[in-house]
Structures are given as structure tokens and as C-alpha cells.
Image (spheres, rainbow, N blue to C red):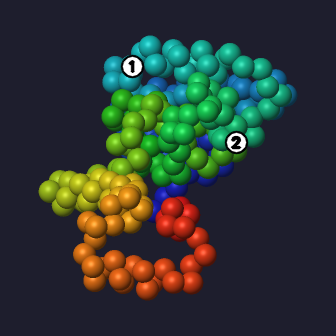
């Protein structure tokens, strides 16, 4: 897809409706902010999205008092429950096709006027391993690419720790020629292995 969201929420709604022409697509408008009166749209597929989650999102949008919402990032900070969490609770995108796919999966989308992004909730870890273009390819190839993403993420998280553990605590596991190569490569480096990996 070559189109993307703009700062006008009305255009963004049309971009979503071009992709989902179902009458069960609901877009409920709310005014948020005492002074800015910013238009916030809660979009979902009636009968597909969880009704209790829809009501919880609306409750949270009505629960805070603020002068104005200028961007979707401000709204994200206000409605998240665990602000100290290292893991994101929402997914933002500027692509209408990704947003439409999320709606078809039963998720809820928030659109804010003057913001070229949409906020998708709820999210799981697997949501961040999916690309918007995954829906356009043949399933065997796309499934292979997704498996590669998981494998690459596993290696990226585990190999640095494994390298530090082996070189610091179990150096006898490394073949002698490789250990000599590591030693020669580290000459002149003023940092420890742990700092170097970080």
C-alpha cells in the first residue's frame, strides 16, 4: 500500500472505510481535552471486538482531565495502566492497511485528530513480529519469514549473554584457535567483555 494516514481524522476514517465496507465497523467519536476539545475516534468491528474491552477503553478516555490532547502519543500515556512497564501496551502505525487488518482481527483502533498515526490495542508480543506486508504474500513464504524473525530475535537476545558467559566463566569450551583469535582481536580494547557487548 502506498497511502498513509494524514493529520485529518476525517480522511483517516475514509482510508479505513475504503478497506472495510462492513456495516459492523463502528467509529464512535469523543471529545477529549477541556480546552482543545480534540476529536478522538474509537473504531472497532461490532461482533468481533470484545465488548468489555471497548467499554474499558471508553471508560479510560473519560476518566482523566486534561487541558488538551495534541497528539496520539499524549493519549497513549494517559490511558496506559502500567506506565513503568518495559513492554509497550499499544501499537502505533501510520498505515491504513495495517489498521484495517488489526480491526479484522478484533482489535480496537484509536484515531486522534491532528495526528497521522493510529493506536492499536490490545497488543501481544507476536503483534510486533508481524509486518504489514505479511498479509499480501503467499502463506508458506510469509510463515517462513515470520519464523526467521523469531529465530533472529532469539539469537539477538541469547548470543551476547552466551558470549559473555562462555568467555568469562567457561573459556575451556572455546576451541584454542578461536580463543586466540578473540584474544588478538581484544588487544587494545580498554573495556571488559560485558561492557563491550552492551
Query: Which residue is denoted by mark 2 in the rendering?
Result: 71
Ranked by sequence position, the earlier of labels 1 and 2 is 1
Q: Position of residue 58 (x, y in %)?
A: 58, 18
Q: Nearer the viewer, residue 145 or 17?
A: 145
Q: Quadrant of residue 24?
A: top left
The secondary element bearing badge 1 is classed as loop
Residue 46 appears in the rendering: yes
Q: Quadrant of residue 77?
A: top right
Q: How far apart are labels 1 and 2 at the CA level? A: 26 Å
Q: Tell me the residue at 34%/42% (across/down).
A: 126
- On-image quarter of the N terminus: bottom left
Q: Tell me the residue at 58%/47% (across/down).
A: 117
The secondary element bearing badge 2 is classed as loop
Q: Tell me the residue at 53%/16% (across/down).
A: 56
Q: Position of residue 175 (x, y in %)?
A: 25, 75
Q: Nearer the viewer, residue 13 or 70?
A: 70
Seen in the image, is 164 located left or right of residue 72?
A: left
Q: Residues within 10 Å of mark 1 (few under 14, many from 20)?
A: some
Q: Position of residue 55 (x, y in %)?
A: 51, 15
Q: Residues within 10 Å of mark 2 (few under 14, many from 20)?
A: some
Q: Position of residue 165 (x, y in %)?
A: 38, 58
Q: What label does residue 184 carry, if any?
A: none
Residue 134 appears in the rendering: no
Q: Tell me the residue at 56%/64% (across/down).
A: 195
Q: What label does residue 50 carry, if any?
A: 1
Q: Nearer the viewer, residue 172 or 118?
A: 172
Q: How many marks?
A: 2
Q: Are marks 1 and 2 in contact (CB under 8 Å)?
A: no
Q: Is residue 16 above or below residue 26?
A: below
Q: Quadrant of residue 167?
A: bottom left
Q: Residue furthest left?
A: 140
Amino acid at each position: 500500500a502506498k497511502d498513509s494516514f494524514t493529520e485529518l481524522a476525517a480522511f483517516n476514517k475514509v482510508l479505513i472505510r475504503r478497506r472495510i465496507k462492513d456495516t459492523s465497523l463502528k467509529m464512535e467519536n469523543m471529545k477529549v481535552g477541556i480546552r482543545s476539545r480534540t476529536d478522538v475516534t474509537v473504531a472497532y468491528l461490532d461482533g468481533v471486538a470484545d465488548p468489555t474491552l471497548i467499554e474499558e477503553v471508553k471508560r479510560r478516555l473519560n476518566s482523566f482531565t486534561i487541558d488538551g490532547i495534541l497528539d496520539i502519543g499524549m493519549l497513549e500515556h494517559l490511558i496506559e495502566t502500567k506506565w513503568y512497564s518495559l513492554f509497550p501496551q499499544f501499537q502505533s502505525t501510520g498505515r491504513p492497511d495495517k489498521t484495517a487488518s488489526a480491526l479484522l482481527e478484533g482489535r480496537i483502533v484509536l484515531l486522534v485528530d491532528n495526528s497521522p498515526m493510529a493506536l492499536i490495542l490490545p497488543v501481544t508480543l507476536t503483534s510486533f513480529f508481524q509486518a504489514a506486508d505479511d498479509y499480501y504474500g503467499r502463506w508458506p513464504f510469509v510463515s517462513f519469514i515470520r519464523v526467521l524473525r523469531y529465530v533472529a530475535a532469539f539469537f539477538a537476545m541469547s548470543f551476547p549473554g552466551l558470549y559473555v558467559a562462555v568467555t568469562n566463566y567457561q573459556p575451556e569450551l572455546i576451541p584454542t584457535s578461536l580463543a586466540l583469535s578473540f584474544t588478538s582481536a581484544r588487544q587494545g580494547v580498554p573495556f571488559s567483555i560485558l561492557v563491550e557487548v552492551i
